[in-house]
Amino acid sequence: MKNEEAPSPLALYAARAAHSPGRRFSEAPPSTRSEFQRDRDRIIHSAAFRRLEYKTQVFVNHEGDLFRTRLTHSIEVAQIARSAARNLHLNEDLVEAISLAHDLGHTPFGHAGQDALNDRMQPYGGFEHNLQSLRLVDTLEQHYGAFDGLNLMFETREGILKHCSAANARQLGDIGQRFLDRLQPSLEAQLANLSDEIAYNNHDVDDGLRSGLLSTEQLMEVDFYARHAHQVAAVYPGIGGRRAINETVRRMINALVTDLIDTSQARITDAAPQSLDDVRHAPPLIAFSDEMATQAALLKRFLHENLYRHYQVNRMTSKARRIVTDLFDAFMAEPQLLPPDYQLAAAISGSSDTTANNSRQARHIADYIAGMTDRYAIREHRRLFQIDEL
């Protein structure tokens, strides 16, 4: 009997481990799973992945138990991306690995923490969470005796690195070359990227309503939300509260995913790629329709104006920026305050070049701060700046 639940055969243009440049360090192939399954498993078992449980999207970790964290967000992205990948006959294991790893490099306190750390790191090359995610899986995770990092497959690393300046790309070797050559990543990477957008837009709506910072009356001014809310009211007369919100958000996600699959399939059919190399030389093939892209952009604009810039969110992000800035400045002024693994004195580095040593020390400090959870950063700030904390 045919198993209708089994994954469909991969399309010609899907990523395949057999055609991959492989891993940075040679390893024997896995005996009971695929190469991309191995990547997914390594990501799930990493310390950086566990820390995502206490890193936030919009609301700081201590503000409530039901708001999204980077961990729950990453799982939701993986669910959306894997479902779409199956419909498009793409590599589900690869798209899941990319989705689960895409936020590993985020600082505590979301974008406020990243902006503060990037500001302080400007004299030393700046800070960007995509590059930090790659740095984590390539270098900072320490699990294996034979190499630093997780030694992931090329396509997984490529998908993690969504954005990259030309200057940084030149320093990254093969993984940065596509930015210089203006080529596209795999369809799996493109799909993970847009699945991320679907997840955070719609779930920020849910969290905004749950927090009371947004109201359904406000959201009814957004056509995309209002249309689906009216559908829910028509199908379930009298429904209200959380049940109505959940039904509305669920329908919004379904509409976006369905549009993404249908539009992407049509673009793939028109481009007719016969290989992953054809995908790289084509324009982006994973996309929303023009109408849906407009609706998603209007929703995003609404969230920026009414949630992300809400005065209560601004108050917390202001505190978050101060915490990250204070920590960085304190550690740069007195590196001996750092845990020993993050200290880099001139004597240790073996160099008398003060500028180079400062740059290396700053990068170690950025690694330390970026790896903090929200609550750890708050505690570390108290330990450094409050006399009654040890």
Image (tube, rainbow, N blue to C red):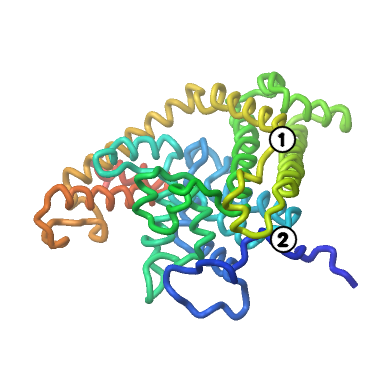
Residue named by callout 2: 11
Q: Position of residue 150 (x, y in %)?
A: 45, 66
Give the CA separation, mark 1 to mark 2: 22 Å
Going by the picture, which residue comes out furthest to the right?
Answer: 1
Q: Position of residue 255 (x, y in %)?
A: 76, 38
Front residue of this view, candidates 149 and 322 = 149
Q: Is residue 54 visible?
A: no
Pick the front one: 260 or 229: 260
Q: Circle 1 — which element?
A: loop
Number of numbered discs present?
2
The residue positioned 36% from the left and 42% from the top of the image is: 378
The residue carrying pointer 2 sits among few (fewer than 14), some (14 to 19) or many (20 or more) residues within 10 Å by Cα, namely some
- Name the amino acid, label 1: Ser
Residue under pointer 1: 289
Tell me if 373 is positioned left or right of 30 in this view: left
Asked if residue 263 is positioned above or below residue 305 in the image, the reply reads below
Q: Is residue 338 visible?
A: yes
Give the SS element for disc 2.
Answer: loop
Q: Is residue 124 above or below residue 215?
A: below
Q: Amino acid at mark 2?
A: Ala
Relative placement, left or right, of 320 versus 302 is left
Q: Which residue: 21% across, 56% down?
A: 343
Q: Are marks 1 and 2 in contact (CB under 8 Å)?
A: no
